[in-house]
Image (spheres, grey):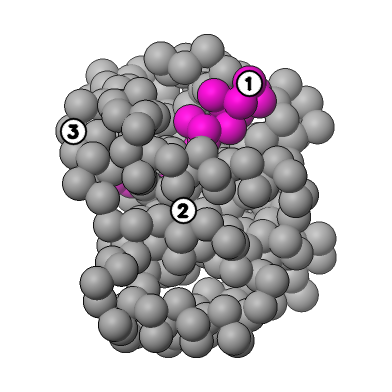
């Protein structure tokens, strides 16, 4: 039965999709059957895996609205053990269309029940907001991984997401835990990065992953080639960081 991990932070630009794509690819490279669900209407996770978001016939949108089963929409990727449930801009309309649906927060969870046994890991790339798409993701997940950019406003955003996790735990999904906090975009030459990293570790202790994802050109370039970093340049520091993150997940189980 798959472990479902939502990758969420309502702040954009913190390395959320980069983490979703590269963690999924690294788990797949470790021969764990993995499904990446793109819950962001921008569909950047699809692009990052070379899935043509313009020409996909069905997306997670049809699944949320109950028009298709998840198994009918899943696409293969270049990696043998990695599938993706694609997205496109249609998903913007899902939040509005779901408003009158009964159990609207549980649509994704219901859809995943059908395919959960086929995978060992299901990774959900949440949109950078706390709307109905993110709530659906958190209601379906076992845990939340929060990517956090090493910058001044990081702590502020963290307060909001931990509050949201608490609300979802109370109202929709009692088993939801914090998988861990992942420090991203770390620049070793920048004192502030070290300061933020230290503060987060003091505050959250073992909830913070040991791995830190560096700022890395190869990691930024990879999506434009439609490849995760380990297929683009496995020797790059960025690719290695996500391979280590997958190792940490596999070794430690949940941080929660």
Q: Residue at x 23, y 40 (%)?
A: 218
Label 2 crowding class (10 Å Cα cut-off): few <14, some 14-19, many 20+? Answer: many
Q: Nearer the viewer, residue 247 or 137?
A: 247
Residue corresponding to mark 3: 224
In the rendered image, residue 47, in percent from the top left (x then y), is placed at 28, 32
- Reply yes or no: does residue 33 show up in magenta: yes
Quadrant assignment for the C terminus: bottom right
Of the residues under marks 3 and 2, which one precedes in the sequence?
A: 2
Give the vertical position of 220 relative to 181 (above or below): above
Label 1 crowding class (10 Å Cα cut-off): few <14, some 14-19, many 20+? Answer: some
Residue corresponding to mark 2: 126
Q: Which residues are magenta?
A: 24-43
Q: Name the mark on residue 31.
A: 1
Quadrant assignment for the N terminus: top right
Mark nearest the camera among 2 and 1 is 1
Displayed quadrant of residue 207: bottom right
In the rendered image, residue 108, in percent from the top left (x then y), is placed at 61, 43
Q: Nearer the viewer, residue 138 or 228?
A: 228
Mark nearest the camera among 3 and 1 is 1
Displayed quadrant of residue 193: bottom left
For the residues bearing labels 3 and 2, Cβ distance under 8 angstroms: no
Of the residues under marks 3 and 1, which one precedes in the sequence?
A: 1
């Amino acid at each position: 039965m798959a472990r479902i991990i939502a990758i969420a932070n309502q702040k954009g630009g913190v390395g959320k999709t980069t983490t979703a794509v590269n963690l999924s690819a690294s788990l797949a490279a470790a021969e764990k059957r993995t499904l990446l669900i793109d819950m962001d209407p921008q569909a950047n996770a699809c692009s990052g895996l070379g899935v043509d978001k313009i020409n996909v016939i069905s997306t997670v949108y049809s699944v949320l609205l109950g028009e298709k089963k998840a198994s009918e929409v899943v696409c293969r990727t270049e990696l043998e053990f990695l599938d993706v449930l694609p997205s496109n801009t249609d998903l913007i309309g899902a939040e509005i269309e779901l408003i009158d649906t009964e159990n609207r927060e549980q649509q994704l969870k219901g859809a995943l029940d059908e395919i959960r046994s086929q995978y060992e890991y299901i990774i959900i790339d949440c949109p950078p907001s706390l709307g109905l798409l993110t709530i659906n993701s958190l209601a379906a997940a076992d845990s939340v991984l929060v990517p956090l950019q090493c910058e001044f406003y990081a702590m502020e955003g963290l307060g909001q997401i931990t509050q949201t996790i608490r609300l979802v735990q109370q109202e929709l999904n009692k088993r939801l835990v914090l998988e861990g906090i992942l420090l991203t975009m770390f620049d070793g030459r920048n004192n502030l990065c070290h300061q933020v990293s230290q503060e987060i570790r003091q505050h959250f202790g073992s909830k913070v992953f040991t791995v830190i994802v560096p700022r890395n050109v190869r990691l930024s370039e990879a999506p434009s080639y439609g490849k995760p970093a380990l297929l683009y340049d496995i020797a790059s520091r960025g690719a290695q960081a996500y391979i280590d993150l997958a190792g940490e997940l596999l070794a430690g189980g949940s941080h929660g």
